[in-house]
Image: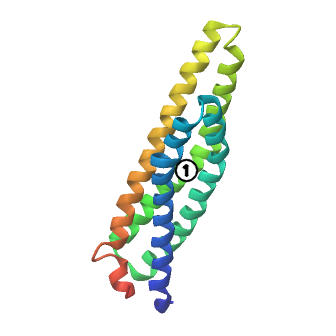
Amino acid sequence: MIRMLPWILRVETLALGLWIGSILFFSTTAAPTAFRSLDVEHAGTFIRSIFPKYYAFGIVCGVVALTGGVAVSAWAGGRLGWVSTALIGVMLATTVYARQGLMPRVDAYRLARAEAAESDVSAYERANASFRAAHRTSVVLNGLVLLLGVIAFLLVRMPDSPTDRAGG
C-alpha cells in the first residue's frame, strides 16, 4: 500500500485541482459571459441548465479527493493531511447542500417571483427577496468552497505533508 501512496496523492491533488478550476472557470468566465452575451432570461436558463452538472462534477471530485485524503492520511500520517482532508469534507458537504438543498429553493423562489410578477406586487417582492437571499447564500457558499479548496490544495502540496512521507 505504501508504494501506492504517491499515486493516491496525485489523484487527490488532481481531483482537488479540477474542482478548484471548475469553480474558477464557472465564476469568472461562464456565468459572467452568459449574462453579458444573452438577455437575462436566456442567461438564467443557460446557467440553471449548467448547475446540476456543475455541482455533480464538484461532488465527484470531492468524493475522489476525500477518499484519497483519507487513504494518504491514514497510511502516511501527519496533521496537515488530516486538516486538508477535513477541509475537503466540508467542501463536499457544502456542495451537496448547495445542489440538493439550496438549488431547489432558489428555483422555487424564482418561479414564485415569475408567477407573482404580473398579478401580486407584495407576493413578487417577498419572492424576490427570498430569491435574492438564497442566491446570495449560493454565491457565498461557492466562494467558501473555493477558498477552502485553495487552502486544502496548499496543505496537500506543503512540505511536511503526507506527500513527503508518501515519497511524492
Residue 146 image position (x, y, % from top left): 43, 52
Residue position for label 1: 95
Residue drawn 64% across the image and 12% down it: 123
Residue 111 image position (x, y, % from top left): 69, 25
Residue 78 image position (x, y, % from top left): 34, 75
**Seen in the image, is 76 located left or right of residue 108?**
left
Looking at this rendering, what residue extends furthest in the bottom direction? 3
Q: Which of 159 and 14 lies nearest the eye of the viewer? A: 14
- Rendered-image quadrant of the C terminus: bottom left
Looking at this rendering, what residue extends furthest in the left direction? 159
Quadrant of residue 163 within the rendered picture: bottom left
Position of residue 68 relative to residue 20, above or below, is below
Disc 1 packing (10 Å; few <14; some 14–19; many ≥20): many
Q: Amino acid at mark 1?
A: Thr
Q: How is the image coloured?
A: rainbow
Residue 31 image position (x, y, % from top left): 53, 43
- SS type, badge 1: helix
**Seen in the image, is 161 located left or right of residue 99?**
left
**Seen in the image, is 16 located left or right of residue 98?**
left
Q: Which of 88 and 132 lies nearest the eye of the viewer? A: 132
Q: Which of 7 and 72 lies nearest the eye of the viewer? A: 7
Position of residue 87 relative to residue 13, above or below, is above
Q: Which of 31 and 105 lies nearest the eye of the viewer? A: 31
Residue drawn 39% across the image and 85% down it: 166
Number of dots carrying numbers: 1
Position of residue 102 relative to residue 78, above or below, is above
Residue drawn 45% across the image and 47% down it: 28
